[in-house]
Image: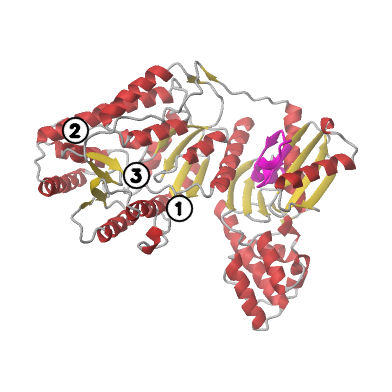
């Protein structure tokens, strides 16, 4: 019995051949070069030639590394996180923390006694402190990469390299050379900077011995020495740490063969390969449009004034137009909608309603007013309290009355209580229909993907509620016979606004099902109805203040408890907490959320994303590793 693991990294491609006794028969390290596929082919055929084997002699092949999807002959692809955990456990069964510094990223992995991943953190946004970083520094110092470690051992602690950005650090090194600092001192300063960065990663998941280091940088004695000083303990390193990922892949391949696991999934009923349920169109309505940005905007009041409220989407393509008006460290959604404004894509709107729900939204209003300077336009900002008590309800109701008066005076119209109650009835009806639809979905009676459901709700929020209600009734009749019977990880998604629903598709394509979400542009938009009363504005205020809170409201623990209740009720295995970059409210909550989920032993993945899918590769790797972690925990039970 033979299995092969192939690890395609950015710098090297590594291969390992195992037999049924878990003996390493062959290990190969070659440069990856320009083509991951060619490097994988070369590694594979070199192993076969060396042992006079044919392709038929190999029982199973697992590919890993950043180029794992470029291996057409692999039976399976597994993330490098899981593979490094397995490989480290092979050499060091007592290992609990694994540090892997590869060519373009660094990872710290916490594992159990069987080498199963319990938690991980990774830096995959840039090459800071990785093998590529050290390559560039060695070239700048005009020494061989292999010399850096031994040379640094003779260095003194008199050089500091403050930047780990490869470009800026290279400039620093050039300046240090110009200042006649010794090469040994510069090497030591570089290694110390790397050690500080990796130590911070270790502390994020908690230091637990034994510590094992894998990857090509583990061969650098200078980096290892500085890390041991910072961590206060010895680091275990195998004889050839560079093959660790390939070894783990080969071990996983052997487990697959020995257990003869054959997984199958199915969706029962009359499933259709036709268009997605989210791909629907309705007749353009004749109502003039008023735009809004936050789910705390009272759409019922806007509709009562005779307008169709439409939540503004940002530009789907990256643009730098907004950078001239906004600071760099602001929510990417804010930038994306300002781009839409600057590019003239919102000229058909009669006005905009803003909510002072966060600093980004406040800055958005300021930018919008600036762009409309000299124009006669309706731009109104609505304050909203952070508390959810009765005082907050009455405070918000008074603000809504001022909005009503402003709509009446600006557009020369009158909004009667009957108009407001009629609008409330329309939105109540569609919210009731959405909740019925979601109940059927949660119970497995509508076998669509979570990605399709979220896309449907996201699009439906901007459709006339009467039309969306009709369409949902149609969907329930057409899709009710399709049941999802797959035995796969069930996930919950929450956090910041998710403008790019393709993130959910990445998650489900990796082998999970998103059962439920709590996102302000998804199901939460349709979550609570409004009582018809003699004071409809107060009723509207009560609905928005008392509904399931978002992160900008005070009580984070209430939010967490709501989510945990939903997960328990719907038998959900784990959660994904999605945040947009610079989303202060959601990022501030994350440490508390992480601590609570850890204490309750509930798997949680944090995805910090921008507005586009430019980081799709990194998202995919994190999601796949998380699902492998979930599946491993499930198999243990």
Disc 2 target residue: 423
Task: Please tell me which of labels 3 and 2 falls first in the chain.
Answer: 2
* 378 up-or-down from 62: above or below: below
Question: Residue 100 placed where, x, y %?
Answer: 67, 53
**Which one is in front, 464 or 193?**
464
Classify residue 257 as left or right of residue 325.
right
Residue 167 visible to an observer of this rendering: yes
Check if residue 422 falls in the magenta segment.
no
Disc 3 target residue: 550
Q: Are marks 1 and 2 in contact (CB under 8 Å)?
A: no
Q: Residue at x 20, y 57 (%)?
A: 375
Check the picture and name the quadrant holding the N terminus: top right
Alpha carbon separation for disc pair 3 and 2: 24 Å
SS at mark 3?
loop
Q: Are marks 3 and 1 in contact (CB under 8 Å)?
A: no
Question: Residue 206 placed where, x, y %?
Answer: 58, 52
Check if residue 71 falls in the magenta segment.
yes
Please state the extent of the stretch shown in magenta in the rendering: 62-89
* In this rendering, the label closer to the viewer, 3 or 1: 1
SS at mark 2?
helix
- Residue, far right: 52
Question: Residue 60 placed where, x, y %?
Answer: 76, 33
Residue 112 visible to an observer of this rendering: no
Disc 1 target residue: 318
* 61 up-or-down from 363: above or below: above
Question: Residue 599 placed where, x, y %?
Answer: 50, 43
SS at mark 1?
loop
**Which one is in front, 57 or 467?**
467
Q: Residue at x 31, y 49 (%)?
A: 554
Q: Residue at x 57, y 33 (%)?
A: 511
């Amino acid at each position: 019995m033979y299995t092969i693991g192939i690890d395609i990294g950015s710098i090297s491609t590594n291969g390992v051949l195992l037999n049924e006794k878990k003996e390493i028969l062959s290990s190969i390290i070659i440069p990856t070069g320009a083509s991951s596929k060619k490097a994988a082919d070369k590694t594979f055929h070199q192993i076969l030639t060396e042992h006079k084997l044919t392709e038929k002699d190999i029982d199973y092949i697992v590919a890993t590394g950043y180029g794992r999807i470029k291996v057409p002959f692999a039976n399976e692809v597994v993330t490098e996180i899981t593979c490094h955990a397995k490989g480290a456990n092979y050499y060091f069964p007592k290992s609990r923390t694994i540090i892997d510094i590869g060519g373009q990223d660094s990872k710290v992995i916490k594992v159990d006694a069987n080498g199963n991943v319990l938690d991980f953190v990774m830096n995959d946004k840039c090459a800071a402190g990785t093998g590529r970083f050290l390559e560039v520094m060695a070239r700048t110092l005009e020494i061989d990469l292999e010399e850096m470690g031994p040379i640094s051992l003779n260095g003194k602690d008199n050089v500091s390299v403050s930047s780990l950005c490869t470009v800026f650090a290279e400039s620093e090194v050039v300046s240090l050379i110009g200042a006649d600092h010794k090469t040994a001192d510069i090497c030591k300063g570089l290694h110390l900077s790397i050690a500080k960065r990796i130590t911070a990663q270790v502390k994020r998941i908690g230091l637990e011995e034994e510590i094992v280091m894998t990857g090509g940088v583990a061969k650098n004695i200078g980096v290892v020495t500085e890390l041991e000083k910072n961590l206060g303990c010895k680091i275990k390193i195998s004889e050839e740490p560079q093959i660790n990922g390939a070894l783990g892949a080969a071990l996983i391949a052997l487990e697959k063969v020995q257990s003869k696991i054959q997984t199958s999934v199915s969706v029962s009923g009359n499933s259709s390969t036709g268009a997605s349920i989210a791909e629907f169109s309705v007749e353009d309505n004749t109502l003039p449009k008023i735009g809004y940005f936050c789910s705390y905007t009272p759409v019922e009041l806007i509709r009562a004034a005779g307008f169709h409220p439409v939540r503004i989407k940002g530009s789907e393509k990256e643009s730098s137009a907004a950078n001239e008006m906004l600071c760099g460290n602001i929510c990417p959604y804010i930038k994306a909608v300002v781009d839409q404004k600057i590019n003239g894509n919102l000229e058909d709107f009669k006005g905009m309603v803003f909510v002072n729900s966060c600093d980004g939204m406040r800055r958005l209003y300021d930018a919008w007013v600036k762009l409309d300077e000299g124009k006669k336009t309706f731009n109104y900002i609505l304050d909203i309290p952070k508390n959810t008590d009765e005082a907050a309800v009455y405070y918000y109701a008074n603000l809504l009355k001022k909005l009503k008066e402003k709509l009446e005076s600006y557009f020369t119209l009158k909004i009667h209580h009957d108009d407001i109650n009629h609008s409330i009835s329309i939105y109540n009806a569609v919210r009731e229909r959405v909740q019925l639809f979601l109940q059927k979905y949660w119970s497995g009676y509508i076998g669509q993907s979570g990605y399709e459901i979220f896309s449907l709700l996201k699009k439906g929020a901007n459709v006339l509620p009467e039309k969306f209600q009709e369409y949902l009734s149609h969907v329930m009749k057409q899709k009710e016979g399709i049941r999802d019977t797959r035995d796969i990880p069930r996930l919950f998604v929450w956090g910041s606004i998710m403008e790019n629903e393709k993130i959910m598709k990445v998650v489900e394509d990796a082998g999970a099902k998103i059962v439920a979400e709590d996102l302000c542009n998804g199901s939460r938009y349709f979550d609570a109805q409004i009582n018809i009363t003699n004071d409809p504005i107060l009723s509207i205020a009560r609905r928005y203040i008392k509904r399931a809170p978002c992160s900008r409201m005070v009580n984070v623990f209430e939010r967490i408890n709501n989510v945990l209740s939903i997960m328990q009720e719907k038998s959900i295995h784990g959660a994904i907490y999605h945040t947009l970059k610079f989303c202060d409210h959601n990022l501030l909550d994350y440490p508390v959320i992480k601590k609570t989920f850890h204490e309750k032993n509930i798997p949680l993945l944090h995805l910090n994303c921008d507005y586009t899918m430019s980081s799709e590769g990194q998202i995919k790797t994190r999601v796949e590793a998380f699902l492998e972690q979930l599946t491993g925990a499930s198999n243990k039970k």
